Image: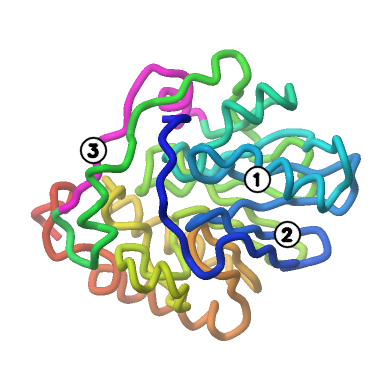
């Protein structure tokens, strides 16, 4: 998977946003990575973008924190190809640990491949293209550890992880209660990720997890309810622009209330017949 460059872009590709003084969101082609921290001696990287993006991510890190700077650790919201595309190369360069939920470790240690994307779900051209997306496990060997059971996050003081499965078994979201800041991963997203047009234009729209890779819709619904109950003030999602204020609060509340209508496909391989 590391060597499979995918030529997918949005108008936000290559753009970084200072969401907060210590939270920087950078869009790598169609997916967001985050740098958390405002000191070159004390920051982490959340997710690692698309395949073949390691050099660009190193450049982004060094532009923000200085030449030869490196994060204390890499935190993964989950292990899908667009969130771990550069992780093997970055670990090799930086010699740092990676942390993910215990349930995600089989996909990150070469033991288990993800289920194939479901190209039959409705929503747009990206969904139709999804069977071409890589699902092979990567192998981080002894460079990866499970996130602490007490829900703390290494090197992210004040933050806690929440298990938000559905999109993947070990998906996590990261939350800082002091200012209600959320890094949601793909538990929900801020763009209609199935539509190539909306991915390219980054039209803001609070949506459920990308349909073509979500395999447990009951768990996904519960995860959205859990995040909505936090009433986040600002959110960075895996796809789409950072969102805050009423756009976030009203959009997330509506998604939680109308999840089956807004998020769950009408049909598809992973849609429970009982829904």
Find out whether the residues at labels 3 and 2 contact each other: C-beta distance under 8 Å.
Answer: no
Give coordinates of residue 60: x percent, y percent: 73, 50
Q: Is residue 233 above or below residue 208?
A: below
Task: Tell me where the magenta segment starts and ends, as one range.
Answer: 102-119
Residue found at the far left of this picture: 273
Our reading of the magenta stretch's main secondary structure is: loop
**Residue at the spot x=38%, y=42% of the render?**
168
Q: Give the residue displayed 46% in from the left and 60% down from the top.
A: 9
**Label 3 element class:** loop
Q: Which disc number belongs to residue 56?
A: 1
Location of residue 175 in the rendering, given as x and y in whole percent from the top left corner: 65, 56
**Residue at 44% across / 62% down in the picture?**
188
Q: Quadrant of the N terminus?
A: top left
Give the class, few, some or many, for how many residues have Cα within 10 Å of label 2's Cα (few <14, many ≥20).
Answer: many
Eye-nearest disc, 2 or 1: 1
Q: Callout 1 environment at 10 Å: few (<14), some (14 to 19), or many (20+)?
A: some
**Disc 3 to disc 2, C-alpha distance:** 32 Å
Task: Give the secondary structure at mark 2.
Answer: strand
- Which numbered disc, 2 or 1, marks the residue that appears first in the sequence? 2
Q: Nearer the viewer, mark 3 or mark 1?
A: 1
Q: Is residue 165 above or below residue 264?
A: above
Task: Please determine whether, in this image, residue 2 is positioned above or below residue 25.
Answer: above
Residue 24: numbered disc: 2
Q: Which image quarter: residue 107?
A: top left
Name the spot of residue 103 as percent of width and height, x first. Answer: 44, 30
Is residue 224 shown in magenta? no
Tell me if 6 is positioned left or right of 113 in this view.
Answer: right
């Amino acid at each position: 998977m590391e060597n499979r460059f995918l030529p997918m872009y949005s108008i936000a590709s290559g753009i970084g946003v200072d969401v907060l003084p210590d939270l920087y969101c950078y869009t790598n082609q169609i997916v967001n990575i985050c740098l958390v921290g405002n000191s070159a001696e004390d920051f982490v990287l959340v997710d690692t973008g698309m395949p073949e993006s390691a050099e660009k991510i190193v450049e982004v890190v060094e532009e923000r924190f200085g030449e030869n700077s490196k994060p204390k650790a890499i935190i993964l919201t989950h292990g899908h190809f667009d969130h771990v595309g550069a992780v093997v190369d970055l670990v090799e360069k930086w010699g740092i640990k990676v942390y993910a939920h215990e349930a995600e470790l089989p996909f990150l240690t070469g033991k288990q491949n993800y289920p194939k994307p479901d190209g039959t779900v409705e929503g747009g051209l990206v969904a139709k293209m999804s069977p071409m997306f890589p699902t092979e496990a990567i192998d981080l060997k002894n460079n990866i550890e499970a996130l602490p059971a007490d829900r703390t996050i290494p090197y992210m003081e004040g933050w806690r992880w929440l298990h938000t499965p559905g999109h993947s078994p070990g998906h996590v979201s990261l939350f800082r209660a002091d200012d209600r800041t959320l890094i949601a991963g793909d538990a929900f997203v801020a763009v209609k990720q199935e539509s190539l047009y909306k991915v390219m234009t980054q039209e803001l729209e609070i949506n459920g997890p990308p349909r073509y890779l979500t395999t447990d819709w009951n768990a996904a619904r519960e995860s959205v309810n859990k995040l909505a109950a936090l009433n986040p003030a600002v959110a960075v999602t895996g796809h789409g622009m950072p969102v805050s204020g009423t756009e976030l609060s009203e959009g997330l509340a509506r998604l939680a209330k109308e999840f089956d209508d807004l998020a769950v496909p009408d049909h598809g391989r992973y849609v429970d017949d009982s829904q």
